[in-house]
Amino acid sequence: VDVYRVALDVDADAWRAERDSKGVSVDEATCKKVLTIDMLRDVDAKTFFSALEEALDPRIRGIATNMATAENDEGNFMAATAEAAEVAEEAAFDALSDLRSNLGDLKKGDQVKLTLETDGAVTVEAGTTDDLSASTVFQR
């Protein structure tokens, strides 16, 4: 049963430039990205967020772990980076909690858009395609 359709829009030229110069994948690139989820049927908020958290939780924890275990050019562990990773992880989970408390049930035809800007800011918009309400929820 189809519940939603997902699309990822990426600044292709910016990503290609990063890929060619730094060898990064599209998910590692710092270019602007927009993830759009189109609802194909009605879904209550609890079910939507349960699925969203199931998908995002391991990714957030993985990103934080990678940040926390970063080493400098000399191979030394960077304590400041580890502290920043913990703060970033907490902010991401707080943002999901805030989003959960502000978003109600989703109806067929609604959209949820997550926009990752080049500065790391993430904006979440949700609602009908004609009336999306926006809120900046967390930073990279």
Image (tube, rainbow, N blue to C red):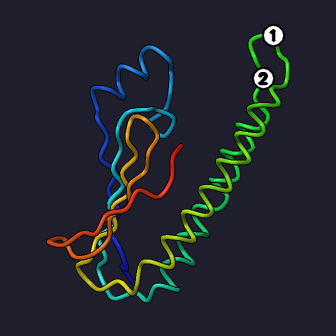
Q: Nearer the viewer, residue 139 or 32?
A: 139
Q: Position of residue 58 (x, y in %)?
A: 67, 58
Residue 4 percent location from the top left of the image: 35, 74
Please give the count of numbered marks on the rendered protein.
2
Q: Quadrant of the N terminus?
A: bottom left
> Contact (CB < 8 A) between labels 1 and 2?
yes
**Distance from label 1 to label 2 (Cα)?**
7 Å
Q: Quadrant of the C terminus?
A: top right
Q: Residue at x 80, y 26 (%)?
A: 78
Neighbor class of circle 2 (other Cα within 10 Å; few <14, some 14-19, many 20+) is some
Rendered residue at 38%/55% (across/down): 123
Q: Is 20 on the left-hand or right-hand side of 138?
A: left
Q: Which mark is residue 71?
A: 2
Residue at 64% over, 62% down: 57
Where 7 sits versus 69, above or below? Answer: below
SS for dot 2: loop
Residue that sits furthest to the top in the current view: 74
Q: Sort mark 1 into few (<14), some (14-19) or many (20+) by Cα contacts within 10 Å.
A: few
Instruction: Identify the residue at image location x=27%, y=26%.
Output: 13
Q: Is residue 44 left or right of residue 82?
A: left
